[in-house]
Amino acid sequence: MILNTELEYKGNLFPSKIIAYKKDVDTLYFTSENNVVLQLTIERDSVLRFRYTTTSIFENDFSYAITKYASKGFNHLEIEEDDKNYIITTSKLICHISKLDMRTSIFDVKDKSLICEDELGFHWEESYEYGGDIVKMSKVAQDGESYFGLGDKPVQNNLKGKRFENWVTDSYAFGRTTDPIYKTIPFYTGLHHKKAYGIFFDNTFRSFFDFCQERRNITSFWAQGGEMNYYFIYGPDMADVVSNYTDLTGKPHELPPLWALGYHQCKWSYYPEAKVKEITSTFRKLKIPCDAIYLDIDYMDGFRCFTWNKDYFPDPKRMVKELADDGFKTIAIIDPGIKIDNEYSVFKEGLANDYFCKRADGPYMKGKVWPGECYFPDFTNPEVREWWSNLFKELIEDIGVKGVWNDMNEPAVMDVPGKTFPDDVRHNYDGNHCSHRKAHNVYGMQMARATYHGLKKFSYPKRPFAITRAAYSGTQRYCSTWTGDNVASWDHLSIANAQAQRMCMSGFSFVGSDIGGFAEQPNGELYTRWIQLGIFHPFCRTHSSGDHGDQEPYAFDNNVTNIVRKFIELRYQLLPYLYTAFWRYANEGIPILKSLVLFDQEDPHTHYRNDEFIFGEKILVCPILEPNARGRRMYFPKGDWYNHWNNEQVKGGKENWVDADIDSMPIFIKAGAVIPKYPVQQYVGEIEIKELKLDVYFKLGKEKSQVYEDAHDGYDYKKGRFSLRNFTLVGKKDSLTIQQFKSGKFTTSYETFELNLHGLPFNISKVVVDNEEIDFSKIITNTNSLIISKEFTDLYILGE
Ligand code: MIG
């Protein structure tokens, strides 16, 4: 028998032949002679859930990852059998289950091609020490198969040839080979023969994935307890795999307030108040846009959550208001460790209500973190989450803090082996009592969830904004995230790029890195290159550790300040574009950043590209990742692309050199795109938008674009008060038509559109707006800009 586990081998066990089969609406049960039951649920035509027990009895079916809003239902289901197999057919796939040994194979219903096939299939070892099983699955890797996803792994896009572990871990100054790190997202996409499928192994125990590392043509995954419980998600488009995974584990419950997509400034730590004000006023003085300022742990009294150090911050409410008047949203950190202190109300309440985690034999789980010895709320207890959420009343409702930053929620414990709770710690797990072995990977997620609910309650009618470091699948429903304690190095700039793309491919798009690096200090050049990448990450924040000097956009030299300002300004101009991409993500689960493989999986070149990605739907970016660069080579995926800086056109499907001195970076716009832009603001809402700029990039042929708008905060958009503009551009040799179809009940603040026409192959002779010819000489500039001072549905531009 071939091992596929690092664990001490005690003997793999296997299902024997199937002796019984039963169907219950959408769920099929196959029972083997040796008491293994495979429960197969048809979630959707393209989504199957496989769940196994080795004792004929299933655990209580409970998951923190799967959302109650997941789509269910299928169009077609047919179950047949032949001598060898049970055969299940939906409108998307065919699944064979071998009568002999329960192994499964899945085929595309259209062309009958093999998509995913068990090797050993489900097998297990008995876990005498803990009870239950070590559950394992192995699959045959198909010819030329590549693998993507798995959350925050700091490695190149394609995971083939590597093995990973999932165990949420505080990983200060992690590197490319550090594994595991902060997040557990046990979901990957496999791609072969141009077809993609996904596997989500919804098991919270410490788990492992091996992508052809141990055995060249075998992919396997296993966990140290719990059930073999995984979802098979068929594409064949990778984009559909990711969006179906996101449908299962949840999209963000609401859009972020628009300001949260602005630029954030952070440091460990800005204090006292005078320092905070000095930072914010410098931003305003130098006209560098910024929407959020962070308070790290030093704002607290002895690191006690929900308290303030009154020497540093004598009147937080006044300060937060003054910052708000200047356009700054204050975001405060909250950690899970509650200081053992009988004078401290949060501690006393937690103790009185029995809300803290306990060890197996009864004592509280005691661990050292920033406040000293602490107890830790059991966030897997719904009552504790409710209590925790109510603790935010003062901070949010009274003081006016707008966002909360959850850190150390792996949970991190100092100076102990494993840097976290020991395995025996007990958890409620929403009534499914268990040890830390099972609850560890969701602890941070449940803390973020409780925090999110507190924010939501006390920010109402505004939208909440939270950020977490630790996460399990599904955390994207509640908050944003960052990639943890990275390092100010060129290698880490490239890691940040890989991690953001990977998180987006793993259903969690609201992500960013500590711009400039958390540990150590970047020079001006590295910081500049990092900002250039960072403005294209959904979450955009500079953060750094206190002991390494200043890291604000103006902390280097004037040249750096000017370039950084220019890029942050670009971010602010692109806000309506980014907001639209966020809406697509929140609505349809479409990742905000698309690795090239996700953009065009049929082009094999994209399977191995790491640096380039698509921001939203239409903008291709490629960061500069090396010092002293004057440009770089990059790959252009299919389509025609315009250079953002000079309108030069490039045909996709090849690699090209692109100039990019320190004040530039490769940014390309897809031909046919209509890109909405705002004027530069120092913060969101600073000015009322009176005019929407539409950058129009000519294309021979047809292209669709969207612009989504709403009040940028609040919940009215959920009642239909949004504005969705669907643009269809059709370019011909001598004409250009832009049709606009508007839906939604929200009236945007602008009625004027400035259309900048890029790449028009002709001189304009005639402009017709909604069937009315207009004297375009009055509204056109020599740079091909048209000002249209009304809503239009039909624009027709004719050449000479
Ligand atoms: O042990 O709060 O990743 O962003 O500044 C370090 C202090 C604790 C780690 C976080 C970092 C934060 C820092 N925290």
Image (cartoon, rainbow, N blue to C red):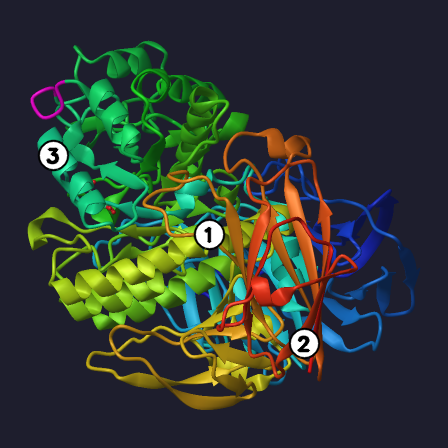
Q: Residue at x 35, y 42 (%)?
A: 683
Instruction: Looking at the image, tell me whether mark 3 or mark 1 is earlier in sequence order.
Output: 3
Q: Which mark is residue 271?
A: 3
* Contact check, label 2 and label 3, Cβ < 8 Å: no
Q: Residue at x 9, y 32 (%)?
A: 274
**Residue 313 seen from this side:** yes
- Report the residue marked by disc 2: 765
* Contact check, label 3 and label 1, Cβ < 8 Å: no
- Report the residue marked by disc 1: 678
Residues rendered magenta in the picture: 310-314
* SS type, badge 3: loop
In the picture, measured across the screen, residue 330 lies left or right of residue 220, that is left
- Please check the rendered image and state whether residue 312 is part of the magenta-colored stretch, yes or no: yes
| Distance from mark 2 CB to nearest ligand 1 atom below 8 Å | no
- Please check the rendered image and state whether residue 547 is part of the magenta-colored stretch, yes or no: no
Mark 3 and mark 1: Cα distance apart in space: 33 Å
Quarter that holds the N terminus: bottom right
Magenta stretch: dominant secondary structure: loop
Instruction: Looking at the image, tell me whether mark 2 or mark 3 is earlier in sequence order.
Output: 3
Q: Dot 1 surroundings within 10 Å: few (below 14), some, or many (20 or more)? A: many
Q: Nearer the viewer, residue 703 or 584?
A: 703
Q: Dot 3 surroundings within 10 Å: few (below 14), some, or many (20 or more)? A: some
Q: Residue at x 49, y 46 (%)?
A: 204
* Res 113 quadrant in image: bottom right
**Residue 730 seen from this side:** no
Amino acid found under the numbered disc labelled 3: Tyr
